[in-house]
Image: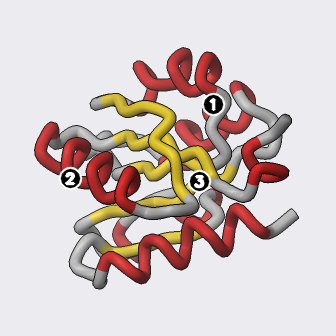
Amino acid sequence: MSSKSRGYASVFVCDDSAAERFLLGQRIQEQRNLYLAGAASTAFGAVRAIEASQPDVVILDHLHHDGDLSVIVGAIRDAVQGIKVVVHSGLPANRIVGVASADAYVHKTSEPDVLWQAIHKVFAAD
């Protein structure tokens, strides 16, 4: 049975900050309709873990890479069909190359409810 049919979204966190991964993980576990599927510090290093855990949504930091974010989003989508990607970054969206390839963008200074709403919105979208 899929997590969607059970009424919750499984979420994978990918952020280069250990503190951010920990805090997001804790906050996800406090949400009644979210489940923490895993976490990783690098996007490309996380692809195998994402493939193994089959989450519904990935929260993806821009990870200070020099490339196009759409390459990472593409690798994640190749690993898990139908996965949703929410970019969660301290950079403004207009400064992240390839951010449009994601399903949503939330700035890290936004209230936590904005992130949870974005996760639920992309999860509910078909």
Question: In the displayed structure, does residue 95 sit left or right of residue 52?
Answer: left
Q: Toward which corner of the image does residue 14 lie, by quadrant?
A: top left
Q: Residue at x 64, y 21 (%)?
A: 51
The CA distance from mark 3 to mark 2 is: 19 Å
Dot 1 surroundings within 10 Å: few (below 14), some, or many (20 or more)? some
Disc 3 target residue = 85
Residue that badge 2 annotates: 23
Determine whether the residue tagged by mark 3 lies in a helix, strand or loop.
strand
Q: 93 and 110: which one is in front?
A: 110
- Above-or-below relation of 121 to 81: below
Q: Is residue 114 above or below residue 22?
A: below
Left/right placement of residue 29 relative to residue 3 reads: left
Q: Residues within 10 Å of mark 3 (few under 14, many from 20)?
A: many
Task: Check disc 1 and report the residue beneath it.
Answer: 75
Colour scheme in use: secondary structure
The amino acid type of the residue labelled 2 equals Leu
Q: Residue at x 78, y 52 (%)?
A: 4
Q: Earlier in the sequence, mark 1 or mark 2?
A: 2
Image position, residue 53 (x, y; %): 59, 24
Tell me what residue is drawn at x 28 percent, y 31 percent: 41
Q: Residue at x 23, y 67 (%)?
A: 90
Task: Identify the amino acid type marked 1.
Answer: Ala
- Determine whether, in the image, residue 112 is placed left or right of residue 38: left
